[in-house]
Protein backbone atom coordinates (compact mmCIF):
# COMPACT_ATOMS: atom_id res chain seq x y z
CA UNK A 1 0.00 0.00 0.00
CA UNK A 2 1.23 3.51 -0.85
CA UNK A 3 0.28 6.23 1.61
CA UNK A 4 0.96 9.92 1.06
CA UNK A 5 0.66 12.31 4.00
CA UNK A 6 0.81 16.13 4.03
CA UNK A 7 2.44 17.08 7.31
CA UNK A 8 3.41 20.06 9.42
CA UNK A 9 5.69 19.94 12.46
CA UNK A 10 5.18 18.45 15.91
CA UNK A 11 1.57 17.18 15.58
CA UNK A 12 2.16 15.86 12.08
CA UNK A 13 5.38 14.08 13.07
CA UNK A 14 3.82 12.44 16.11
CA UNK A 15 0.87 11.29 14.01
CA UNK A 16 3.25 9.83 11.41
CA UNK A 17 4.74 7.57 14.08
CA UNK A 18 1.24 6.19 14.62
CA UNK A 19 0.76 5.80 10.87
CA UNK A 20 3.98 3.81 10.55
CA UNK A 21 2.87 1.61 13.47
CA UNK A 22 -0.54 1.07 11.86
CA UNK A 23 0.85 0.27 8.41
CA UNK A 24 4.42 -1.02 8.91
CA UNK A 25 4.59 -2.52 5.41
CA UNK A 26 3.26 0.55 3.60
CA UNK A 27 5.39 2.79 1.40
CA UNK A 28 4.84 6.16 3.05
CA UNK A 29 5.69 9.49 1.43
CA UNK A 30 5.50 12.60 3.58
CA UNK A 31 5.06 15.97 1.88
CA UNK A 32 6.41 18.48 4.38
CA UNK A 33 5.60 22.11 4.99
CA UNK A 34 8.30 24.68 4.22
CA UNK A 35 6.35 27.82 5.16
CA UNK A 36 8.00 27.94 8.61
CA UNK A 37 11.48 28.00 7.07
CA UNK A 38 13.77 30.94 7.67
CA UNK A 39 17.37 32.09 7.47
CA UNK A 40 19.13 32.96 10.73
CA UNK A 41 22.84 33.57 11.31
CA UNK A 42 23.19 32.78 7.60
CA UNK A 43 21.80 29.29 8.13
CA UNK A 44 18.75 27.91 6.38
CA UNK A 45 16.42 26.39 8.97
CA UNK A 46 13.49 24.13 8.06
CA UNK A 47 11.71 23.47 11.38
CA UNK A 48 8.89 21.27 10.08
CA UNK A 49 11.10 19.09 7.86
CA UNK A 50 13.58 18.72 10.71
CA UNK A 51 10.85 17.90 13.23
CA UNK A 52 9.60 15.08 10.99
CA UNK A 53 13.17 13.91 10.34
CA UNK A 54 14.25 13.91 13.99
CA UNK A 55 10.96 12.38 15.22
CA UNK A 56 10.94 9.50 12.75
CA UNK A 57 14.72 9.11 12.94
CA UNK A 58 14.73 8.78 16.73
CA UNK A 59 16.63 12.03 17.42
CA UNK A 60 13.81 14.28 18.63
CA UNK A 61 13.61 15.98 22.02
CA UNK A 62 10.48 14.11 23.09
CA UNK A 63 9.27 16.57 25.73
CA UNK A 64 9.58 19.61 23.48
CA UNK A 65 8.45 17.94 20.27
CA UNK A 66 11.08 19.84 18.20
CA UNK A 67 14.86 20.08 18.31
CA UNK A 68 17.36 17.38 19.28
CA UNK A 69 17.43 15.07 22.27
CA UNK A 70 20.51 15.58 24.45
CA UNK A 71 21.08 19.00 22.91
CA UNK A 72 23.79 21.42 24.11
CA UNK A 73 23.85 25.20 23.63
CA UNK A 74 27.51 26.19 23.40
CA UNK A 75 27.04 28.24 20.22
CA UNK A 76 23.91 29.95 21.58
CA UNK A 77 25.79 30.90 24.77
CA UNK A 78 28.65 32.37 22.72
CA UNK A 79 26.24 34.36 20.54
CA UNK A 80 24.63 35.72 23.69
CA UNK A 81 28.06 36.72 25.04
CA UNK A 82 28.61 38.67 21.81
CA UNK A 83 25.21 40.30 22.25
CA UNK A 84 24.01 38.78 19.00
CA UNK A 85 20.30 37.99 18.77
CA UNK A 86 17.59 37.16 18.27
CA UNK A 87 17.13 36.10 21.88
CA UNK A 88 13.74 34.51 21.19
CA UNK A 89 14.91 31.72 18.89
CA UNK A 90 17.65 29.39 20.12
CA UNK A 91 19.58 26.98 17.93
CA UNK A 92 21.18 24.00 19.67
CA UNK A 93 24.65 22.77 18.72
CA UNK A 94 23.54 19.43 17.26
CA UNK A 95 20.71 21.11 15.37
CA UNK A 96 23.16 23.67 13.95
CA UNK A 97 25.07 20.83 12.28
CA UNK A 98 21.89 19.99 10.33
CA UNK A 99 21.54 23.62 9.23
CA UNK A 100 25.23 23.81 8.28
CA UNK A 101 24.92 20.77 6.02
CA UNK A 102 21.70 22.10 4.50
CA UNK A 103 23.04 25.62 3.93
CA UNK A 104 26.26 24.32 2.41
CA UNK A 105 24.43 22.01 0.02
CA UNK A 106 21.92 24.71 -0.97
CA UNK A 107 24.86 27.06 -1.57
CA UNK A 108 26.46 24.44 -3.80
CA UNK A 109 23.29 24.45 -5.91
CA UNK A 110 21.42 21.38 -4.68
CA UNK A 111 17.64 21.85 -4.44
CA UNK A 112 15.98 21.51 -1.02
CA UNK A 113 14.50 18.13 -2.04
CA UNK A 114 17.99 16.69 -2.70
CA UNK A 115 19.32 18.25 0.50
CA UNK A 116 16.43 16.78 2.51
CA UNK A 117 17.05 13.36 1.00
CA UNK A 118 20.73 13.59 1.92
CA UNK A 119 19.97 14.65 5.49
CA UNK A 120 17.38 11.86 5.88
CA UNK A 121 19.87 9.21 4.71
CA UNK A 122 21.77 9.62 7.98
CA UNK A 123 18.55 9.08 9.99
CA UNK A 124 17.44 6.00 8.00
CA UNK A 125 13.87 7.24 7.91
CA UNK A 126 11.11 4.66 7.45
CA UNK A 127 9.35 7.13 5.10
CA UNK A 128 10.30 9.24 2.10
CA UNK A 129 10.29 12.90 3.17
CA UNK A 130 9.79 15.47 0.40
CA UNK A 131 9.60 19.22 0.90
CA UNK A 132 6.38 20.44 -0.72
CA UNK A 133 8.46 22.69 -2.96
CA UNK A 134 12.09 23.47 -3.73
CA UNK A 135 11.26 27.17 -4.03
CA UNK A 136 11.27 29.51 -1.06
CA UNK A 137 7.77 29.95 0.31
CA UNK A 138 7.65 31.73 3.67
CA UNK A 139 4.58 32.34 5.78
CA UNK A 140 4.21 35.91 7.02
CA UNK A 141 1.47 37.09 9.37
CA UNK A 142 -0.10 40.57 9.45
CA UNK A 143 -0.44 41.81 13.04
CA UNK A 144 -1.27 45.06 14.82
CA UNK A 145 1.63 47.42 15.41
CA UNK A 146 0.78 50.90 16.61
CA UNK A 147 4.19 52.20 15.47
CA UNK A 148 3.92 50.89 11.89
CA UNK A 149 2.45 52.91 9.00
CA UNK A 150 -1.25 52.00 8.87
CA UNK A 151 -1.02 50.40 12.33
CA UNK A 152 -0.10 46.96 10.98
CA UNK A 153 2.98 45.06 9.91
CA UNK A 154 3.80 41.64 8.52
CA UNK A 155 6.16 39.42 10.52
CA UNK A 156 7.74 36.09 9.67
CA UNK A 157 5.74 33.14 10.99
CA UNK A 158 8.48 32.20 13.48
CA UNK A 159 8.44 35.70 14.97
CA UNK A 160 4.63 35.57 15.16
CA UNK A 161 4.59 32.10 16.73
CA UNK A 162 7.68 31.87 18.91
CA UNK A 163 8.37 35.50 19.88
CA UNK A 164 4.86 36.98 19.91
CA UNK A 165 2.97 33.81 20.97
CA UNK A 166 0.36 34.12 18.23
CA UNK A 167 -1.57 37.34 18.91
CA UNK A 168 -4.73 38.04 16.90
CA UNK A 169 -3.80 38.20 13.23
CA UNK A 170 -5.36 39.99 10.28
CA UNK A 171 -4.00 37.92 7.42
CA UNK A 172 -1.67 35.07 6.58
CA UNK A 173 0.50 35.52 3.49
CA UNK A 174 2.54 32.82 1.77
CA UNK A 175 5.36 34.89 0.33
CA UNK A 176 6.62 33.40 -2.93
CA UNK A 177 3.89 30.79 -3.29
CA UNK A 178 2.67 32.03 -6.69
CA UNK A 179 6.03 31.18 -8.25
CA UNK A 180 6.50 27.87 -6.44
CA UNK A 181 6.22 24.46 -8.07
CA UNK A 182 5.68 21.13 -6.34
CA UNK A 183 9.08 19.55 -5.61
CA UNK A 184 10.16 16.54 -7.69
CA UNK A 185 8.18 13.47 -6.69
CA UNK A 186 5.35 15.36 -4.97
CA UNK A 187 2.72 15.14 -7.72
CA UNK A 188 3.69 11.52 -8.41
CA UNK A 189 3.33 10.64 -4.71
CA UNK A 190 -0.16 12.15 -4.75
CA UNK A 191 -1.21 10.63 -8.07
CA UNK A 192 0.11 7.14 -7.29
CA UNK A 193 -1.08 6.93 -3.67
CA UNK A 194 -3.63 4.37 -2.51
CA UNK A 195 -4.52 6.60 0.44
CA UNK A 196 -3.88 10.31 1.07
CA UNK A 197 -3.87 11.40 4.71
CA UNK A 198 -4.10 14.89 6.18
CA UNK A 199 -2.72 14.49 9.73
CA UNK A 200 -4.04 16.71 12.56
CA UNK A 201 -1.57 19.45 11.56
CA UNK A 202 -2.37 23.13 11.41
CA UNK A 203 -4.89 23.49 8.54
CA UNK A 204 -3.78 27.04 7.70
CA UNK A 205 -0.03 27.43 8.17
CA UNK A 206 1.00 23.77 7.70
CA UNK A 207 -1.35 21.79 5.44
CA UNK A 208 -2.80 25.04 4.02
CA UNK A 209 0.63 26.23 2.92
CA UNK A 210 1.36 22.90 1.23
CA UNK A 211 -2.00 22.95 -0.59
CA UNK A 212 -1.41 26.57 -1.71
CA UNK A 213 1.49 25.58 -3.95
CA UNK A 214 0.13 25.91 -7.48
CA UNK A 215 -1.14 22.56 -8.79
CA UNK A 216 -0.89 20.76 -5.48
CA UNK A 217 -4.43 21.17 -4.17
CA UNK A 218 -5.83 20.21 -7.56
CA UNK A 219 -3.63 17.10 -7.63
CA UNK A 220 -4.97 15.99 -4.24
CA UNK A 221 -8.56 16.78 -5.29
CA UNK A 222 -8.12 14.85 -8.55
CA UNK A 223 -6.28 11.89 -7.00
CA UNK A 224 -7.86 8.48 -7.41
CA UNK A 225 -7.06 7.68 -3.77
CA UNK A 226 -9.44 8.53 -0.94
CA UNK A 227 -8.33 11.63 0.99
CA UNK A 228 -8.91 11.32 4.74
CA UNK A 229 -8.12 13.99 7.33
CA UNK A 230 -8.03 14.09 11.12
CA UNK A 231 -9.31 17.16 12.94
CA UNK A 232 -6.63 19.20 14.75
CA UNK A 233 -9.51 20.88 16.62
CA UNK A 234 -11.03 18.98 19.53
CA UNK A 235 -13.86 20.49 21.52
CA UNK A 236 -13.54 23.94 19.98
CA UNK A 237 -9.81 24.37 20.53
CA UNK A 238 -6.52 23.18 19.05
CA UNK A 239 -5.10 20.00 20.57
CA UNK A 240 -1.66 21.62 20.43
CA UNK A 241 -0.33 24.98 19.37
CA UNK A 242 -2.30 28.08 18.52
CA UNK A 243 -4.24 27.04 15.41
CA UNK A 244 -7.27 28.97 16.66
CA UNK A 245 -5.50 32.29 16.00
CA UNK A 246 -4.62 31.51 12.41
CA UNK A 247 -8.05 30.00 11.68
CA UNK A 248 -9.65 33.24 12.83
CA UNK A 249 -7.29 35.18 10.55
CA UNK A 250 -8.66 33.32 7.51
CA UNK A 251 -12.26 33.61 8.70
CA UNK A 252 -12.75 29.99 9.73
CA UNK A 253 -14.62 29.10 12.91
CA UNK A 254 -12.57 27.08 15.42
CA UNK A 255 -14.46 23.78 15.24
CA UNK A 256 -13.85 20.30 13.87
CA UNK A 257 -16.70 20.70 11.33
CA UNK A 258 -15.57 24.14 10.15
CA UNK A 259 -12.05 22.88 9.43
CA UNK A 260 -13.50 20.04 7.32
CA UNK A 261 -15.64 22.55 5.40
CA UNK A 262 -12.57 24.79 5.01
CA UNK A 263 -10.69 21.95 3.31
CA UNK A 264 -13.85 21.31 1.28
CA UNK A 265 -15.70 18.32 -0.13
CA UNK A 266 -13.79 18.68 -3.41
CA UNK A 267 -10.60 17.83 -1.51
CA UNK A 268 -11.66 15.65 1.41
CA UNK A 269 -13.47 12.33 1.12
CA UNK A 270 -13.37 11.49 4.81
CA UNK A 271 -12.86 13.30 8.13
CA UNK A 272 -12.31 12.09 11.66
CA UNK A 273 -13.54 14.08 14.67
CA UNK A 274 -13.05 13.36 18.35
CA UNK A 275 -15.55 10.90 19.80
CA UNK A 276 -15.71 12.49 23.26
CA UNK A 277 -15.89 16.15 22.31
CA UNK A 278 -17.23 16.38 18.77
CA UNK A 279 -19.57 13.52 17.91
CA UNK A 280 -22.26 16.14 17.20
CA UNK A 281 -20.06 17.42 14.36
CA UNK A 282 -20.45 14.16 12.39
CA UNK A 283 -23.83 15.13 10.94
CA UNK A 284 -22.58 18.63 10.04
CA UNK A 285 -19.55 17.26 8.21
CA UNK A 286 -21.64 14.64 6.39
CA UNK A 287 -24.11 17.37 5.40
CA UNK A 288 -21.18 19.06 3.65
CA UNK A 289 -20.66 15.89 1.57
CA UNK A 290 -17.71 14.47 3.52
CA UNK A 291 -17.91 11.05 5.19
CA UNK A 292 -17.24 11.49 8.89
CA UNK A 293 -16.55 9.22 11.86
CA UNK A 294 -16.04 10.03 15.54
CA UNK A 295 -13.06 8.28 17.15
CA UNK A 296 -10.69 9.18 20.00
CA UNK A 297 -8.36 11.86 18.60
CA UNK A 298 -5.91 12.59 21.40
CA UNK A 299 -2.35 11.39 20.76
CA UNK A 300 -1.95 10.56 24.45
CA UNK A 301 0.16 7.42 23.91
CA UNK A 302 1.80 5.53 21.03
CA UNK A 303 -1.14 3.09 21.04
CA UNK A 304 -3.74 5.90 20.96
CA UNK A 305 -1.86 7.49 18.04
CA UNK A 306 -1.65 4.17 16.19
CA UNK A 307 -5.39 3.68 16.68
CA UNK A 308 -6.08 7.14 15.22
CA UNK A 309 -4.01 6.32 12.15
CA UNK A 310 -5.75 2.95 11.88
CA UNK A 311 -9.13 4.69 11.98
CA UNK A 312 -8.03 6.95 9.12
CA UNK A 313 -6.90 3.93 7.08
CA UNK A 314 -10.14 2.07 7.89
CA UNK A 315 -12.22 5.01 6.69
CA UNK A 316 -10.10 5.27 3.55
CA UNK A 317 -10.62 1.53 2.87
CA UNK A 318 -14.36 1.94 3.37
CA UNK A 319 -14.44 4.88 0.96
CA UNK A 320 -12.35 3.07 -1.64
CA UNK A 321 -14.91 0.25 -1.67
CA UNK A 322 -14.23 -3.47 -1.64
CA UNK A 323 -10.84 -4.43 -3.08
CA UNK A 324 -11.04 -6.28 -6.39
CA UNK A 325 -10.63 -9.99 -5.61
CA UNK A 326 -9.10 -12.53 -8.02
CA UNK A 327 -12.52 -13.34 -9.52
CA UNK A 328 -13.79 -9.77 -9.65
N1 LIG B 1 10.42 27.04 19.21
C1 LIG B 1 10.46 27.85 20.26
O1 LIG B 1 9.44 28.09 20.90
N2 LIG B 1 11.64 28.48 20.64
C2 LIG B 1 12.81 28.27 19.99
O2 LIG B 1 13.84 28.83 20.36
C3 LIG B 1 12.78 27.36 18.86
C4 LIG B 1 13.93 27.05 18.16
C5 LIG B 1 13.87 26.13 17.10
C6 LIG B 1 15.03 25.79 16.40
C7 LIG B 1 14.97 24.87 15.37
C8 LIG B 1 13.75 24.29 15.02
O3 LIG B 1 13.68 23.40 14.02
C9 LIG B 1 12.59 24.62 15.70
C10 LIG B 1 12.63 25.55 16.74
N3 LIG B 1 11.49 25.89 17.46
C11 LIG B 1 11.54 26.76 18.51
C12 LIG B 1 10.17 25.28 17.13
C13 LIG B 1 9.48 25.86 15.96
O4 LIG B 1 10.10 26.80 15.22
C14 LIG B 1 7.96 26.05 15.98
O5 LIG B 1 7.32 25.44 17.03
C15 LIG B 1 7.40 25.51 14.68
O6 LIG B 1 7.95 26.13 13.56
C16 LIG B 1 5.89 25.57 14.61
O7 LIG B 1 5.54 24.52 13.78
Image (cartoon, rainbow, N blue to C red):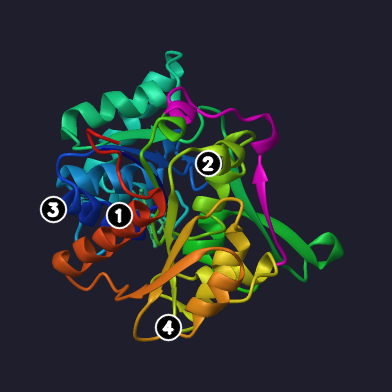
- Tell me the quarter of the image containing the N terminus: top left
Magenta segment: 170-188
Name the residue rendered at 33%, 35% in the picture. Answer: 129
Classify residue 312 as left or right of residue 278. left
Q: Measured along the vertical axis of the image, is residue 151 above or below residue 50?
A: below
Question: Can residue 66 be spotted in the picture?
Answer: no
Q: Are marks 4 and 1 in contact (CB under 8 Å)?
A: no
Q: Mark 3 vs mark 4: which is more N-terminal?
A: 3
On residue 279, which mark appears?
A: 4
The secondary structure type at the circle numbered 4 is loop
Residue named by callout 2: 220
Residue denoted by label 1: 313
Which sits in the foreground, 324 or 229? 324
Q: Which residue is mark 3?
A: 70
Residue at far top of view: 108
Q: Nearer the viewer, residue 66 or 180?
A: 180
Amino acid sequence: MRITALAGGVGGARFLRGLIAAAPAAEITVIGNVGDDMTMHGLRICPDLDTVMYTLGGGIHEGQGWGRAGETFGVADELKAYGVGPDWFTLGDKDIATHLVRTRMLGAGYPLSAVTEALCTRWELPVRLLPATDERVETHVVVDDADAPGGRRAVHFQEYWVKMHAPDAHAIVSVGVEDAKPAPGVLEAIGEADVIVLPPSNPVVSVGTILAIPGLRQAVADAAAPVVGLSPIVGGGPVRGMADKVLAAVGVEVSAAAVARHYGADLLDGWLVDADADSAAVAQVEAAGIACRAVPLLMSSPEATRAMAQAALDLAAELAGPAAGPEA
